[in-house]
Image: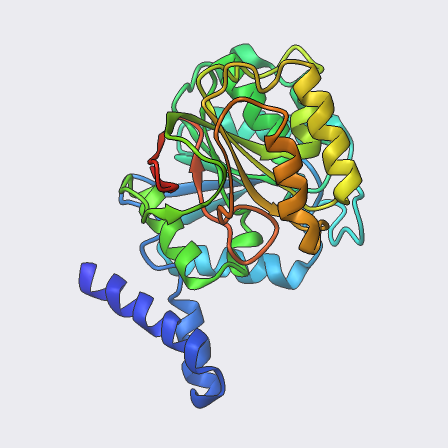
Amino acid sequence: MLRILRLSCVRWSLAVMMGGMMSMAEAKEAEEFAWAGIFPGQIKTVALVAPACPANSSEALDRAIARLKQAGIRVKLMPHAREGEPATRYETIAVEKRVADLEQAWLDPEVDLVWCIRGGTGTPDVVEKVDWKKLRSRPDLPLLGFSDITALQLAMLKERAGHPFAAPSLLGLLTVDAPSLENFRRAMHGKPAEPVQLLPIRGGEASGLALAGHLRLLETMNRTRFRPDTAGKVIFIESPDFHPEQVRASLSRLREAGFFDNCAAVVFGTLSRCGHEAETVVRDFAATVKVPVYMGFPYGHTSRNQVIDLRGRVVIDAGGVLRR
């Protein structure tokens, strides 16, 4: 099995690097085997849910489900997970249906892992209506997703229900680069990730449990009963939609609300709409806090999107090398 997994990784990497040098048939075969071994043997059944928006591409979702099955994973698609698909923008279905799907997936004893199809909008509505007493019955059930799923993951931490991983959505894994796919595989198998060299903005050593999220959702949830405990945490932040002044304003509001008080460090992923101003925005923020601040972590709405275990410990050395 290990030999097959290694060959599959090599095939997929070659397909990415060689592009047109491979025949279409060879490239297709490499893609089909790209997800081989992404989960360890104890994860046999994966439930697919859409707590935010439905898939924005039916073809992409079909392809992702096919890859999971080719990897030997049993897929359970929740009853309403494809309702309203394809979502052209950020349409959602009734929150009661999304809550019912999440609870059904969670309480199914055959389900070993819950994977969110995509982000979008609407997850904060779900966390207010879900029966957390039911979900606390499975305190170690892994849930994968990011972006709008930040709301669900912060609520899980607060309610001590499940094991949240800030990770590519099901559709997102189709578009990650080779290092991010390998990182996903290592994280799911419980293996240490490769070290990441960060850009120090306000240097210093740091360590602590990881906390991660979409900037807009971090601010939204910080105003609710699910406000996260940030003391001693290494906080990872990404933002796909805020322009520089919006990022500055959001970070300022979080700082004034005490969000960064007593945290261990702040690490920025991709600030997608800040462009060449991203470093200036982060430097301006770093001047307002007393903890180490770094940027350059591969986390966000790009092909470079690595897994952050929200129960995992992070260590950053004096040179800005992050290990987890």
Residue 38 position, x and y percent, is 35, 52
Q: Is residue 36 left or right of residue 249?
A: left
Residue 32 position, x and y percent, is 43, 68
Point 34% across, 36% down: residue: 318
Q: Quadrant of the C terminus?
A: top left
Of the pair 89 and 106, the residue shown nearer to us? 89
Of the pair 121 and 205, the residue shown nearer to us? 205
Residue 87 position, x and y percent, is 77, 51
Q: Is residue 95 left or right of residue 174?
A: right
**Eyeballing the image, is 125 above or below 12?**
above
Residue 17 position, x and y percent, is 42, 77
- Place residue 126 in its image quadrant: top right
Question: Taking the image as drawn, is residue 37 in sight?
Answer: yes
Q: How many marks?
A: 0
Point 44% across, 70% down: residue: 31
**Eyeballing the image, is 51 above or below 99?**
below
